[in-house]
Amino acid sequence: MALTRLFLVVLLSITMPLVFFSRAAEAGGAAGVSYGTIANNLPKEASVVDLLRQNGITVIRIYDASPEVLTPLANTGIKVVVMMPNKYLTAAAASPSYALQWVKTNVTAYYPATQINGVAVGNEVFNTNPEFNSVLVPAMTNVQAALAQLGLADAVKVSTPVAFDAIQYSYPPSAATFKGALVPVMKPMLDFLQRTGSYLSINLYPFLTYTAQPGNISLDYALGNSKDGVRDPNTGLVYHSLLDAELDATYFAMEKLMTGSSSSATAATEAIGAREGLGDSMATNKGMRVTVTETGWPSGGGPHRGRAQMTLEAAADGAPAAATVANAQAYNNYVINRVLSGDTGTPHRPDADMDVYIFALFNEDLKKTGPDDTTERHFGLFYPNETKVYPFDFRGGGGGAPTTTESWCVADASADEDLLEEEMGYACDSADCSAIEPGGECFDPDTIVAHASYAFNSYYQCNDRASGSCDFDGAACVVYQQPKFGNCVLPSNNLKE
Ligand SMILES: *[C@@H]1O[C@H](CO)[C@@H](O)[C@H](O)[C@H]1NC(C)=O
Ligand SMILES: *[C@@H]1O[C@H](CO)[C@@H](O)[C@H](O)[C@H]1NC(C)=O
Ligand SMILES: *[C@@H]1O[C@H](CO)[C@@H](O)[C@H](O)[C@H]1NC(C)=O
């Protein structure tokens, strides 16, 4: 056994692609898709699995545990989170044996051929079935205990998607707290998630925030690329993306609940680290992971809310309607490319890892709509006939977003020099670094930041700018303007455009 392990370690360290993937797995997070099916015209599930594979979508969520989806997912390597519908929460909370039977039928029957990696116990319970609030954490506890009993505690994590309106006072982010009425549920839930190594699941829709108060929020900010940004007066942190502000509101609300005070992230996470004996590794630096179980932007349909106000605003400044193909393309590509680049940190949690699921795979024609609201039916990345509504790319080619078709990886100038040296050595073990050797065309300027940038970029480009290939232990970042050091222009190896 020990010998086999030693052999494996040696193998891993000499086999470049394996090393690469092992690093990619720990970096940043994954970009996936929520596969909703409230429609009467969607393709057969087996055909959908082919569509996922053709488009490089390797992480999905479904809203049940349908055999029609889980069976064709077998042996595809696609990871899937299944869901226990709200109507079973009471039974799962009351009866460990019900939870065990549920897990056997809906998880172990498919695992490991089908890579189920999570169970969502309920969905937006606070909004849709508040009568189940009190059974939510007991149900999660019993489902997790069943998974543990079956040896799946590490492979399959239990969480529950929460709508963003669980948070009160979301602006400025540092002022955010969970709604008082939800504290008796959220506090034990966060303890449960921490104890079981799971993550908080939250659904974030900058689109909804924007359409609720268009006069206050710029479209650029809602789409993730405000130039000026919005400053949190309490922390001085500047936000260029409403998604980041909503994420930080979530982190701040969690921290307050987990320490019972409004002390800083570091204090909160250190306290947790000390209590759980986690040392200074993940808990101190990153805190509990947050997964965005839904985010997205509709490509069509009527205004969601406040039509009169929207129309006034539009008339006043000539602003286009929010739900357009161009905006949906911009927002969803911003989210996908951000996660694929490994850049999942926020102003308050620069080291945070995060998984994101775009809502949704298809336009769903039976989603409920109000008299003024048909946007709900237009969140899909694909039409039901499997044609893309607009370009996007889950393979990390940066395709689809007009501003991000090319990208480069550079060293963070504020990073520790020893770290840069070490990571540069790592990059140059597999990438071509001859240009930064004495006499090479990029030897000048002879600085660590310039040389490390060359090396990191070389590694990033030769891995096709794949997810996690610009991490370098946090000492690197992705940029969208071609970088130049002296006369040395960092090359791009753009295979897509
Ligand atoms: C899961 O399992 C239970 C019982 O074994 C079954 O009744 C239920 O319909 C299954 N599916 C879902 C999505 O809960
Ligand atoms: C804009 O934001 C401010 C500060 O949060 C708030 O008081 C105001 O009501 C908002 N205006 C609109 C139109 O939503
Ligand atoms: C798929 O459906 C969309 C929307 O109805 C339509 O615009 C597009 O032309 C269709 N594509 C094909 C290949 O039929």
Image (cartoon, rainbow, N blue to C red):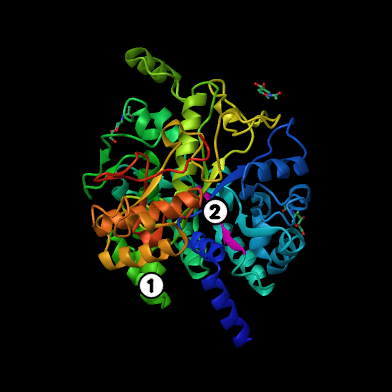
In-front residue for pair 463/263: 463
Is residue 79 toward the left or the right of residue 392 in the image?
A: right
Is residue 32 toward the left or the right of residue 340 in the image?
A: right
Q: Picture coordinates of residue 122 (x, y %)?
A: 61, 52
Q: State the mark number for residue 273.
A: 1
Q: Compute the Cα span from label 2 to label 1.
A: 28 Å
Q: Picture coordinates of residue 222 (x, y %)?
A: 39, 34
Magenta residue span: 156-162
Q: Single out the mark in the foreground, 2 or 1.
A: 1
Q: As shown in the figure, which amino acid type bears the numbered disc 2? A: Asn
Is residue 59 toward the left or the right of residue 343 in the image?
A: right
Please give the residue where the numbered disc 2 appears in the rendered image: 133
Task: Choose top left, top right, bottom left or bottom right for residue 484.
Answer: top left
Is residue 319 toward the left or the right of residue 390 in the image?
A: left
Instruction: Examine the rendered structure and indicate whether residue 351 appears above or below residue 335.
Output: below
- For the N terminus, the quadrant is bottom right
| Mark 2 element type | helix
Q: Picture coordinates of residue 445 (x, y %)?
A: 23, 52
Q: From where the camera sits, is residue 165 visible?
A: yes
